[in-house]
Image: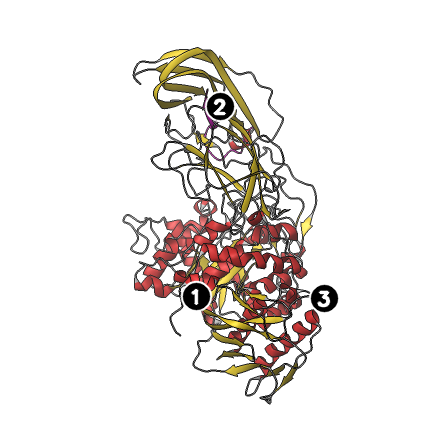
Amino acid sequence: MKKGIPLFLLSLLFISPGCKQTKEVVNEYNIVPLPNQMIPQEGRFELSSKVKVVTTACTPEVKTIADSLVERIALTSGIRLSQTDQANSSAPTITFAMNPQLPAEGYELSVKPSGIILSASQPNGFFYGVQSLYQLLPPAVYGRTKDKKAAWSVPAVEIQDAPRFPYRGLMLDVCRHFSELDYIYKFIDQLAAHKMNTFHWHLTDDQGWRIEIKKYPKLTEIGSKRKETLVDYYYTNWPQIFDGKEHGGYYTQEQIKAVVAYAASKYITVIPEIEMPGHAVAAIASYPELSCTPDTTYDVTGTWGVFDQVFCPKEETFAFLEGVLDEVVDLFPSSYIHIGGDECPKTAWKNCDHCQTLIRTLGLKDDTTPNAVDGKKHTKEEKLQSYVITRMEKYLNSKGRNIIGWDEILEGGLAPNATVMSWRGVEGGITAAKAGHNAIMTPNPYVYLDHYQEDPEFAPTTIGGYNTLKKTYSYNPVPDDADELVKKHIIGLQGNIWNEYMQNDERRDYQTFPRAIAIAETGWTENRNKNWNSFCRRMVEEFERMDIMQVKACRNFFDVNINTHVEPGSGVLNVVLESFYPNADIRYTTDGSEPTEQSERYTQPFALTGQLDLKAAVFNKDKRLGKVSSKSLYGNLISGKRFTTTPAMGWATGDAVNEYDVLGADSTTLGLTNGKRGNNASYAPWTSFGMSDTCGELEFIVNMEKPTKISKVVFGSLFNPAYRILPAGGASVEVSNDGVQYREVAASTFARQFPPKGRKAYTDSLSFQPTEAQFVKVKIQNGGTLRNGIDCRKDTPGEIIHADLYIDEIEIY
């Protein structure tokens, strides 16, 4: 394949009168994922009933692909193309041509005003070429009804294309919330349209067993149903609140066969996941003898998390797992079977006589020196998990299959032929690749599609995190400077759709798209060819396609992200407005009024001064494209200034780290001086501080840089006892001119009326006589103690614990 041309050329637009056009038509090339070589040409190929689809020397399978093209064009345009094995030089043609020199998934697409030639060596290459052809046609081609108003022509272009990675997939969890078959088929259609080739189907977990196993009928009779499901975020309420509604569902073996066949028709491999040895509560509820405590009765759980009830590695359990896998192997022709291997607590094994005897029999011991593969010390129980994984791998190998497991299967020694799916960041995949094992990159947070993708203050509840479309697109599975072994063994990437907080199809669509399309481009397009601005330009039409296909994607692509940012060296906190929509015309107001096309146009960042009730929207001429974004901003004397805290900040550090800021991590404001206050919706904007017997207050110090007259301090704190958080019990303000000697100017305690449940943000202020200060020290006392196990979940020792402080924003006036 020839070297691809520079990406900026791909944005060229060719204007041509076309063969029979009555007005000028703009050639656009909105293909996603981006082809690795695409050269725009002048002119267009017109579709009409005179066009012949030529399949000379093609296999029946390729002819079926050509048939699908003919049928789709007929359905959506009303134009009936005729298919033939004999080319007629006088008629315009779409020719399917075999070319054994092309790579297995590659294709060439040549569009001229006189005809189209699609070449490939394998059926899947032809299939992917047809997907590109669809994306060159009007979006109406994805519909189910006739659209005679669309311009049914194809822009001239020369494409040579093949994927970067052989594994390009999405995982769908149907255990936490069941997906009906209609959605599964729709989901597969989206994978196919974007040249993804793997559907990882997460079929068993603590919250539900979703696959019929005829040998073990209780798995669906009992394990597929739970009596109720958690309401709200996991840590919002304690005791947790449940909806009282039974939730269930599973797929029969006949349904699974139909799904597998449908996916195969679109060149998608379905990889089933049967979790072991952890995430086994649904199976153990069905067959308690599989656990380490067989005399205990278990229920399928309706809450989320990691549970101590795991498979006990005894012969009865291995016989059960082998029986399950026998039927799974018959249903799924995939060369891979995913066996989980993640989040398996060892508590039950440590307390189990059988497990400890087995550990001694196998001669397993705690490491005294780091493991050669991952450089970590592993316990004998972790090595027991490796024994379980290796034994199941050998069984599947005897069936002609290989295993995939989450990166925890590295712990205690990696099974010989296993492929690692790296989810806890990138380290597991890199480690496996360096050890000569294949790895699939699925790192949290880049490709975790259950995370927030727009401002958590206004978005539906998710599992947490913050992972924008821009951030997902930025991910590169194989760094350019990676060694050759890593490049060889990282075989692809996958997006993960965990369904704890996706209760219905609309929520699944919202969380998955458009970020899944960014993942598709990363899997297909060479990193040197990826370009964020080009992607955004092409995504505008992609949203039209998704609308026609009734995909309810998140549409913050058309909205304004309201942010604050300190430019290095300036010391000034600026308001930054950004939209993913290309060349967005952003209009905004600062007084709370609705922005219109006549409102102030945003052209560059501006300094935050005073309190702003900011609203902003994207306009195209006189039409507003998305919703109105709004946020209150609080400019004050320390906006954007550096500060120190004692104790140090905890894991929740506002939008300063973990790329909460879509412009990149801002190391200057650290959440407490960014002009944005915390809210009740999530933990994202809050900064956490751990409290203890020896540290019962937060000390915040800021240097105002010169003597400044001040008279008030304002700060926010959070109430959420289920998450071990109480708001401030009191506060004081001290001032200094040298940063050494301080004097107190204000102190107060706070009496509060707490809500009976949930989260609540409090804003407190301390006013005092105007005074000059260069250094200001704010001391914030913690809100007291909590009854461990009563006010919050008990997963630490102690009956009484100190509540943590979550603070945001600290303002000085």
Whole-Å distance between the Cαs marked 3 and 2? 57 Å
Q: Of discs 3 and 2, which sits in the foreground?
A: 3
Q: Secondary structure at mark 1?
A: loop
Query: Is 187 left or right of 744, judged from the image as shown?
Result: right
The disc, 3 or 2, on the residue closer to the chain's N-terminal end is 3
The three-letter code of the residue at mark 3 reads Thr
Q: Residue at x 63, y 62 (%)?
A: 186
> Is residue 811 shown in magenta?
yes
The disc, 2 or 1, on the residue closer to the chain's N-terminal end is 1
Q: Secondary structure at mark 2?
A: strand
Q: Position of residue 259 (x, y in %)?
A: 62, 67
Q: Residue at x 60, y 76 (%)?
A: 19
**Label 3 crowd bin: few (<14), some (14–19), many (20+), radius 10 Å:** some
What is the number of the mark on residue 361? none
Whole-Å distance between the Cαs marked 2 and 1? 49 Å
**Label 1 crowd bin: few (<14), some (14–19), many (20+), radius 10 Å:** some
The three-letter code of the residue at mark 1 reads Phe
Colour scheme employed for the rendering of this structure: secondary structure
Work out which quarter of the rendered image holds the N terminus and state it: bottom left
- Specify the quadrant of the image occupied by residue 80: bottom right
What is the number of the mark on residue 715? 2
What is the number of the mark on residue 145? 3
Q: Position of residue 317 (x, y in %)?
A: 52, 58
Q: Nearer the viewer, residue 579 or 751?
A: 579
> Is residue 812 shown in magenta?
yes
Reply above or below: 443 against 614.
below
Q: Which residues are magenta?
A: 791-813
**Label 2 crowd bin: few (<14), some (14–19), many (20+), radius 10 Å:** many
Q: Of discs 3 and 1, which sits in the foreground?
A: 3
Label 1: which residue? 165
